[in-house]
């Protein structure tokens, strides 16, 4: 059964994938009909097929007889007739009548007939190939729609399918919900390596306690070292955190392993590990080298212990390696999946057993369905390749990923082309803690986000951030300066990658603009400027410098704006709602395609590219005019309340209050009109700021 269809998300998905297809396989000017056909091939036949000239033959054009492309295989042929629509004209999806069904029937009858007149070369090749191998091959005809059939057309389709089935021909229908389902059916991280372990112990009878669905054993460490060498990070994929650098506990393990006495006592001084698996097989009687075979294994507790042992082992000389293999034993509990999943036992084990290195709420949520689905959505189709991000859901995960040899996702998905940055900064990534803060502010909780102390990975905040999404009613309310967040304005379903990426892109850009440097550097730059202009003498006392700084609006406003780094995210979404209405998936996807937003995300939201011409110059820019309007509102408010703010013992807390955020929003709307007649690089005269924002 398919998952729940989401119109806005489908519209965003299909346009994103078609854009990606144009960029990688076609030309930008190619029409939707061609891009949609290629998209259908990528979705249902696999994207690799598009590069296989012997298997994928595009035939659409003059004399195609209703065949847009076909797939040639040894055992048969599958041809497709694809019908696209302009989503701008059909935002709720197009309902097709029976015309494409009748055209598909005509195409089948042409391919199976003896008539070979009037077909183009591609269709003729399909027809001749099928006719030649007819006795030993299959023929499948597919109707693919960027929409859905009407009820009467569906009835007609069933008639054709039944008729052709009697003739030995397969007829298939792929509608918009089937395309959507194909993309989202397996949103959880897929393709996890199938890990098989062969665990050994000193004595299979004395060192193993067998129970129903689980066992406990004192194991040799060498098979586990070999497993890390073979599978790497994949062995710990279900662990609630990855390798921690600089841990005192891990340092103690290395110290313990460094002496012969420590290696022999290791089994007594370490809490051991926990492994889950689909199943395990006891050794047979009479095995010369008895081992316990464990299928689809995952170390869910013990990543720090095993990775530390592995690192120490690999750095040791042969003599120490031999001693580790013979002397180091480790206690392990191994549970099959039915036992581990019963009454949430595995979750309780993880909480109870992760105390050697302190465990935080974020890590305890790292393997939840919400977190794994989000991680998948940030790199999988149909997201455009240049916007793919590695989503960090637990401590140390990105470092471990970059050291691993995972097949999926590939590191190349996230690499910033042309970047001179080093290490993990060469890869686009988003940490779920950062995402939680910005999204919480974006949907109307800026005062709480700015104040800090929010437990984003505990309910009710966790559900509001990661398990639910804003309803159309919330976005409508966001247009009002005096908007007040209410949890009942959320609806079931996670926010999509398009919504989250837009929030991150805009929120992070505004944050960097209001907080370009640290307070110390801002202070030193202000003093240098004041000395240069003669306001402050080079020989001024600290008291004189302080007085001068407190009278300098540029310095004060810079300090105060920096203390509103998360508040500006809500101001940004407020202004975008006033311009674009509901920030649903489709709208967000279109905003992501704007030149500067796309470039900003492509470069990993690197602060160093803020002044790049791809952001500051040219058409279809959103970030610069948005910041300028936000900045106008901030400066107006700060100027009007300067003395009041100076009198506050904790300006950050005062600036973050809801009533002050309301006033800043009002200032933005007032100045949006106030500067209508002024001309700026991004705004012509007679146009307000919001009117200058690009249309989507």
Image (spheres, rainbow, N blue to C red):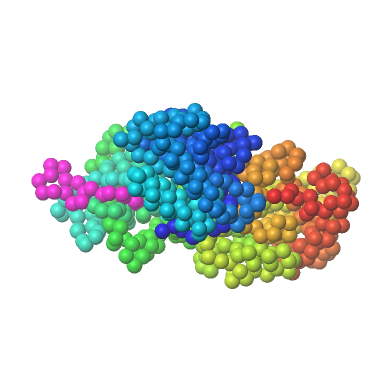
Residue in view at x 80 percent, y 48 percent = 526
Residue 267 position in % (x across, y down) = 27, 52
Specify whether 410 is left or right of 489.
left
Majority secondary structure in the magenta region: loop
Q: Residue 279 location in percent, x, y? A: 26, 53
Examine the structure image and report whether residue 287 is included in the region drawn in magenta. yes
**Of residues 626 and 123, which is closer to you in this image?**
123
Identify which residue, 566 or 43, lies in the foreground: 43
Residue 406 left/right relative to 642: left
Q: Is residue 628 visible?
A: yes
Give the image quarter of residue 207.
bottom left
Q: Residue at x 37, y 44 (%)?
A: 169
Looking at the rendering, which quadrant does residue 225 occupy?
top left
Residue 538, position as x, y percentages in the image: 84, 44
* Range covered by the magenta-colored residues: 281-299
Judge from the rendering whether residue 156 lies leftward or rightward of residue 271; answer left or right. Answer: right
For the question of whether residue 182 can be seen, the reply is: no
Residue 283 highlighted magenta (yes or no): yes
Residue 51 position (above or below residue 348):
above
Q: Residue furthest left?
A: 286
Q: Quadrant of the N terminus?
A: bottom left
Most foreground residue, 81 or 163: 163
Camera-side residue of 656 and 68: 68
Q: Please, is residue 265 above or below residue 315 in the view?
A: below
């Amino acid at each position: 059964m398919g998952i729940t269809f989401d119109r806005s998300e489908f519209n965003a998905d299909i346009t994103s994938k078609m854009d990606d297809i144009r960029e990688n396989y076609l030309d930008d000017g190619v029409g939707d009909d061609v891009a949609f056909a290629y998209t259908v091939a990528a979705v249902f036949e696999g994207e690799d097929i598009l590069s296989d000239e012997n298997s994928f033959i595009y035939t659409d054009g003059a004399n195609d007889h209703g065949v847009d492309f076909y797939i040639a295989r040894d055992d048969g042929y599958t041809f497709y007739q694809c019908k696209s629509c302009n989503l701008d004209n059909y935002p709720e999806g197009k309902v097709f009548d029976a015309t494409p069904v009748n055209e598909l029937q005509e195409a089948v009858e042409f391919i199976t007939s003896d008539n070979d007149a009037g077909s183009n070369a591609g269709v003729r090749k399909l027809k001749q190939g099928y006719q030649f191998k007819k006795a030993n091959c299959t023929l499948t005809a597919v109707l693919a729609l960027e929409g859905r059939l009407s009820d009467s057309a569906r009835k007609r389709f069933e008639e054709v399918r039944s008729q052709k089935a009697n003739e030995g021909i397969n007829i298939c229908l792929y509608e918009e919900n089937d395309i959507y389902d194909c993309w989202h059916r397996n949103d959880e991280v897929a393709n996890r390596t199938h890990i098989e372990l062969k665990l050994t112990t000193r004595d299979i009878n004395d060192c193993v306690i067998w129970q129903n669905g689980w066992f406990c054993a004192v194991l040799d460490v060498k098979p586990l070292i070999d497993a890390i060498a073979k599978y790497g990070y994949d062995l710990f994929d279900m662990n609630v955190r990855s390798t921690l650098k600089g841990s005192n506990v891990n340092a103690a393990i290395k110290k313990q392993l460094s002496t012969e006495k420590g290696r022999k006592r290791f089994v007594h001084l370490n809490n051991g590990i926990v492994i889950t698996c689909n199943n395990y097989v006891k050794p047979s009687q009479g095995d010369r080298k008895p081992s316990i075979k464990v299928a689809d294994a995952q170390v869910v507790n013990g990543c720090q212990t095993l990775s530390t042992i592995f690192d120490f082992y690999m750095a040791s000389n042969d003599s120490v390696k031999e001693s580790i293999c013979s002397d180091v034993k480790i206690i392990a509990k191994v549970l099959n999946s039915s036992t581990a999943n019963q009454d949430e036992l595995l979750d309780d084990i993880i909480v109870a057993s992760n105390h050697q290195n302190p465990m935080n709420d974020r890590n305890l949520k790292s393997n939840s369905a919400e977190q794994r689905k989000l991680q998948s959505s940030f790199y999988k189709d149909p997201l455009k390749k240049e916007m793919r991000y590695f989503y960090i859901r637990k401590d140390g995960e990105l470092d471990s990923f970059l050291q691993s040899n995972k097949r999926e996702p590939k590191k190349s998905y996230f690499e910033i082309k042309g970047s001179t940055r080093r290490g993990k900064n060469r890869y686009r990534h988003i940490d779920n803690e950062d995402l939680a803060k910005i999204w919480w502010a974006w949907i109307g909780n800026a005062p709480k986000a700015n104040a800090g102390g929010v437990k984003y990975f505990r309910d009710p905040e966790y559900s509001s951030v990661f398990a639910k999404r804003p309803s159309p009613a919330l976005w409508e309310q966001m247009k009002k300066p005096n908007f007040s967040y209410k949890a009942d304005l959320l609806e079931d379903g996670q926010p999509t990658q398009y919504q989250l990426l837009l929030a991150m892109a805009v929120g992070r850009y505004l944050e960097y603009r209001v907080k370009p440097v640290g307070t110390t550097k801002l202070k030193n730059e202000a003093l240098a400027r004041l000395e240069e202009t003669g306001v402050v003498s080079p020989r001024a006392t600290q008291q004189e410098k302080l007085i001068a700084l407190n009278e300098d609006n540029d310095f004060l406003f810079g300090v105060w704006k920096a203390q509103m780094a998360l508040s500006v995210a809500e101001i940004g979404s407020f202004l975008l709602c006033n311009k674009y209405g509901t920030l649903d998936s489709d709208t967000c996807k279109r905003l992501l395609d704007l030149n500067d937003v796309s470039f900003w995300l492509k470069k990993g939201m690197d602060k160093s590219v803020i002044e790049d011409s791809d952001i500051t110059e040219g058409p279809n820019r959103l970030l610069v005019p948005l910041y300028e309007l936000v900045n106008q509102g901030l400066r107006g408010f700060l100027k009007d309340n300067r003395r009041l703010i100076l009198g506050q013992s904790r300006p950050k807390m005062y600036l973050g209050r809801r009533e002050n955020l309301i006033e800043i929003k009002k200032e933005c709307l007032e100045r949006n009109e106030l500067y209508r007649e002024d001309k700026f690089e991004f705004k012509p005269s007679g146009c307000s700021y919001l009117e200058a924002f690009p249309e989507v």
